[in-house]
Each structure stands twice: as C-alpha cells, then as structure tokens.
Amino acid sequence: MDFNTSLSQLPSASAKRIALRIHAPAERALRQGHPWVFDGSITEQSHVGAPGDLAVIFDDKRRFLAIGLYDPTSTIRVRVLQSRDSVTINTDWFQNKLSTAVRLRAPLQQSDTDGYRLVHGENDGLPGLVIDRYADTLVLKLYTPAWIPHLKDFCDALAQVTPATHLILRLNRSLQKQTDLLHGLVDGIPLTLQTPPSLILFKENGLIFESDPIHGQKTGFFLDQRDNRSRVEKLSKGKSVLNVFSYTGGFSVYAAHGGAKEVVSVDVSAPALEAAVRNMAHNKLTVPHETIAEDAFEVLARMASQKRLFDVVIIDPPMFAQSEKQIESALSAYRKLTRLGLSVLRKGGTLVQASCSSRVDNDSFFESVHGSAKEAGRTLKEIERTGHALDHPIGFKEGAYLKCLFAIAL
Ligand code: SAH
C-alpha cells in the first residue's frame, strides 16, 4: 500500500506508560474481559497522560491486569488492548490482531462477498476502531483520538496483512470536533496516494451495491444486515414488499432479486433513495420499484388510511437510544412502528423488524414488538430471531446491538 504524507506527519506515541489502579468492580469487569475502564473507576494514576498514551492497569498486589489506550477526553478513559499477559504494542501486535480478524471473515469468500466489516472494534480486540472493506477500498473509522499516535504503525500492519488500493479515514462526530488533536487529519481524507473513487462498487452475496465511503452514513453501507437481507430474499417470491428506512435499498435489492412482484423503499434521505434506484440498476432488476423520500411514520400512516397493504414489511430504523435515559422512548418508538407496520401488512404477511440500539436489550425489544402487535389485535407467529452477520462478532455485552424479528402476522 502506498501511503501519502498524512500518516508520516503524525506524532508517535509517548514511550512513557501511565500506571493506573482501579476500584474493585471495575477490576472484576476487566478480569471478565470487558474492554473499557471508565474515568470514575480510576483510584490512582502515575501522571497526567495524553490521548494515545499506553496505560497499564495493576491490581492491588502490583500485578499486571491490562494494557490499553488512554483517552483523557472521554469517560471511557482506557480502551483495553490486552489483558492478563503483558505485551509490547507495536506493528507486530497489530498484525497479529488483524490476521485473526481476517481469518474470522474467511468464510465470506465462498459467498461472493467483498463488502464486509474487517475489524469490528472492541469485538475484534481493536477498541474504538472499525474497518470496512469495499472491494479494493478500506474505510478506517476512528472513535477516539487515542489511535492517532499509533495510526502509522497500525496502517503499516494493515498493509502487511490485508492491503488495498485505497485507504480512507473516517472520524466519528465527536472526534471531528477535536481538531487540536488531529494533526491535520480530517474526516474522509485518503491515507493512500491515489485519489479514491467517489462511489465504489462491491458485492454482497453476488449482488452489486455502491457505497459512498466519504459522505455515506456509517462507512457508506449497513454491512451488518447482510444475513437478514438474504433471509428476505428467500421469502420475497411473488410478494409485494415494503422496505421502511431503506437507506440505499439493501433489503429492496434482495427482495427484487428474490422475485418480489413490487418493491417500495421509504427513507427520509432523497440521495439514499437515488442510490437505491441505482443499486437496482446495477443488478439489472426491473421489477416495479417505488421510492418515497419522506418521514417513515407519516408514510405508514398515510398508506394505512389508503388501505394499501403489503405481503412483507421490513422496518429497520436508525438507532433510537443513545443513552440509558432514552431506552423508554426508543421502546415506545419500536411499538409505534410495529403498530404502523402491521396496519399495512396483509393477514398472513411477514413482518421483519430490527433494532440496532445496543442499549435496548433483546428481551425488551422482542416483548415490545409482541405487545404492540397484541394491542393492534394481531398475533405474531415467530419464524426467527436473528442478529448480525459473522463479520460483526460479539466480544462483549455492548457488542450485541442488532436484533431482528421475522414473524408471520395473523
Ligand atoms: N435498512 C437499511 C439501513 C437503515 S439505517 C439498510 O439495509 O441499508 C436507517 C435509515 O433511516 C437511514 O437511511 C436514515 O436516512 C433513515 N431515517 C432516519 N429517520 C427517518 C425517518 N423519520 N423517516 C424515514 N427514514 C428515516
């Protein structure tokens, strides 16, 4: 991989490690493999640290517990890289982690898929960092400034283990604002020499999709729904399918490919729907495809009042609960969506409803969908409860965020 100068001008990590002690509950969590140490659990600290300093956590007998990336700007003060055995964090260590991540995704090669999550942050032992591959482009997204002093070593490891023509850097919203820590890096900047294309074509289960890795949501595509999209493909033959919160039409393309007689995609984002139309064309799918760029709640209410009914209704909304406080309002939004979705679903039709809010646990979500169906006078006969695909492994509680219900609505 040929890197440009953005990486070489970054400062290197401090050689001086921070020594920390933490209170007993945090120590227990760490021993059980939790990857975060919160600011409030630190009881002793050797010296003031900068983002990206390596922090070593010791127990009360001065024995090594874990080493991680220090971030004084976040309440997640340390993101654990390794616990139990002491290690040197360097290019070799990164290579090792990346090789493990690559091995885990090997089965995807058999499914004609070259768009997938290569590194899923904490769940792949690389906390606060995500890498998505779209064919020959890698999109690396950072969630903490602590990675910046390690980025050059990390990218060297990446080039060794799984090279690509283009590497694009994305920064999450809070990191974009920390300009004093970014050393010239900005959201969407290429780290490789060649100018990357603005749209990338990649394959998912043999179907062609485009991704806009610089302006798109997440890194350009919602890769976590791959398996659920396949399930939709299998149940779409001869059906009318409504895809609510469609984004660029992932589920719509699979439904059309599976033989749907009609597909309707609803999303508030007009550019996303334009991409959905192009995604249909990339796959030469000519089934009638209507796109509606409006608020999903309003569209569903209107369709219900017009008695417009579908055989399959897919509801995959954005994250509703960012914090503990929002869990109740998220559950009430899920209930409302179930009610609205069922009001446009034919008797005996299939409801596919997903939640990507990690704060909302599985039971609460599934119970709220069932409860809302009952209130609407419908019974849901479950086909399946599913989660994310294998490239989104679950390494800790918060890593299990996606849940999806497939059910026949009687
Ligand atoms: N199902 C999609 C991913 C959905 S992400 C896929 O498989 O790729 C959530 C989507 O909801 C985003 O595209 C966002 O633009 C859209 N969205 C957010 N709020 C909305 C609203 N009130 N009405 C309609 N769409 C909305």
Image (tube, grey):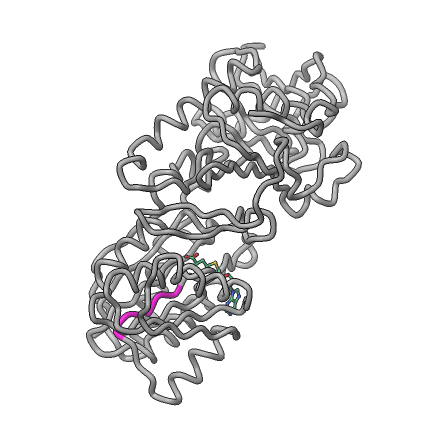
Query: Which one is nearer the viewer's eye here, 188 or 181?
Result: 188
Query: Residue 32: where, in percent of width, then height?
Result: 43, 27
Q: Quadrant of the C terminus?
A: bottom left
Residue at screen point 31% across, 63% down: 352
Q: Quadrant of residue 71?
A: top right
| Image position of 332 (left or right of 387) | right
| Image position of 46 (left or right of 399) | right
Residue at screen point 28% across, 41% down: 111
Query: Which one is nearer the viewer's eye here, 271 or 86?
Result: 271
Q: Main secondary structure of the magenta part?
A: strand
Q: Which residues are magenta?
A: 311-315
Residue at screen point 76% across, 35% down: 184
Q: Would residue 387 be counted in the magenta stretch?
A: no
Query: Residue 214: where, in percent of width, then height?
Result: 60, 48
Q: Quadrant of the N terminus?
A: top right
Residue at screen point 55% across, 32% down: 36
Query: Residue 368: where, in percent of width, then height?
Result: 37, 64
Query: Which one is nearer the viewer's eye here, 395 or 298?
Result: 298
Q: Quadrant of residue 249?
A: bottom left
